[in-house]
Image: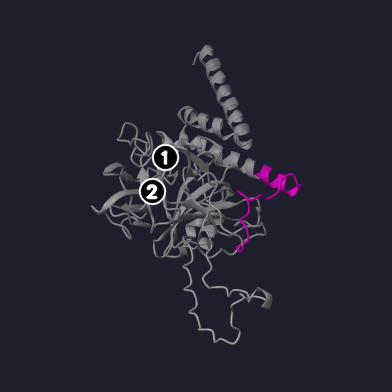
Amino acid sequence: MSQGGKIKKRWVALGVLLALILIGFLVASNWAAIGTSLANPMRRLIGADNVAELEKKLFEIQDTISNWSYQVGLSEPETPWEAPQPASQSISAAPGNELAPTPTRIPTTSTPLPAMDQAEQPADSNPAATETPQPSPTPLPTAAIWMLPDLKPFGELPGEGVWQPYIYNPQGEVVGLRTFLQPDPERPYALVAVAALDLNKTRLHYVLGLKEPAKPGGPHGWGLIPDADRQPGKLLAAFNGGFIYEHGGYGAMADGLETLAAKHGLATIVIFKDGKVRIGKWGEDITWSRDYESWRQNGLIIIDDGEINPEVYSETYEWGANIDGSVITIRSSLGLDQDNRILYYFAGPSLSMPALTDGMAAAGVHNGMLLDINPTHAHFTAMRISGENLVAESLYPEIMDLWVDRYLQPWDQDFFYLTPKE
């Protein structure tokens, strides 16, 4: 190689090093937007595996900083939203949702009227007369409010494990609840937000992204919620899908378009044409059927028929790229209860796979799978109504503060959304 070529190569190496240092600073500072913008160019420059290794080191640095900040008292655990009111108080609608009237608690038993004082008796009343017994008033029905039993808290933050009404259908019925948990005793600041969605009254949909998941040059989706569903009173919520193609090549299909073939034995969520939802292992619990509307895979199953997969505690299995279960980062996941009637979404910062899975198990997940991880990718929004428009509201504002309205426009990566069941 000529002297000029060697000098050029050194400059390129220096540029890569400076870029790595810059990305490290940005990730350690949790400047997710720019860090994400630089990730794809860096993959092309130094390769996906090298970027994944870099991310792993940077997540370790970020976790060290968070831990140190907590230990010295510079930060403390904070609830992701306002703590719920005591159960004795009225349940109020989620803020900003015009379709969510405040439910009125109607008593189920009648209250006897107080006896009138002698002086208050009507002048023509006859004290000696025998009163005819009157039938007791028929109790009015209690207002129907969907609620789940509170979860046993891991920590001591007010409101942990207490369910709040969160998402309402056009009739004002509660169809989604939320709470949070502190599943990692070593990291009390690591909170996982939980959304519980009533599949008896809602329908789940899946959208392939404009670019992911798909092979280079292969078929890809439109990345957009159909106009008929992207309407006030119709769109209730939306949340992220799984990994991009190069982080596993996991299968995906929506509305008959298969962008990546399914792989045997992997965790798969299936949406049937009639609206049923199932999570299981492809080729075992779930086999190919014409009845499927959509499906998505994303690594090994986390909870299988109520049992936690031992790989959750392994430091060798990679849960996306080179990220094993011990790496501390933002993670998200999905689960179903034993009756397949409640869909749970989980997401939170500073989570290992064991901590995330412990939170899922505590919530009652019977079958569960991992979704996307890392800043900007784990994202859940409830759709509120402002006038004639939809407004996206983050489930966990502290970690879901970028491109909050991403699912109201074409989006590069796949995602799910929720509508009322007709």
Give 26 or 227, whichever is nearer the viewer: 227
- What percent of the width, then of the height, locates residue 254? 31, 44
The furthest residue to the left: 290
Q: Is residue 81 visible?
A: yes
Label 1 CA crowd tier, 10 Å (few <14, some 14–19, many 20+): many
Which residue has dot 2 on it?
Answer: 419
Residue toward you, 73 or 45? 73
Is 56 drawn above or below residue 335 in the view shown?
A: above
Q: Nearer the viewer, mark 1 or mark 2?
A: 2
Q: Earlier in the sequence, mark 1 or mark 2?
A: 1
Q: Amino acid at mark 1?
A: Ile
Query: Horizontal and vertical percent for residue 61?
Result: 64, 41
Q: Nearer the viewer, residue 405 or 335?
A: 405
Q: Residue at x 45, y 44 (%)?
A: 240
Regarding residue 196, the answer to whether it shows in the image is no
Circle 1 sits on which residue? Answer: 244
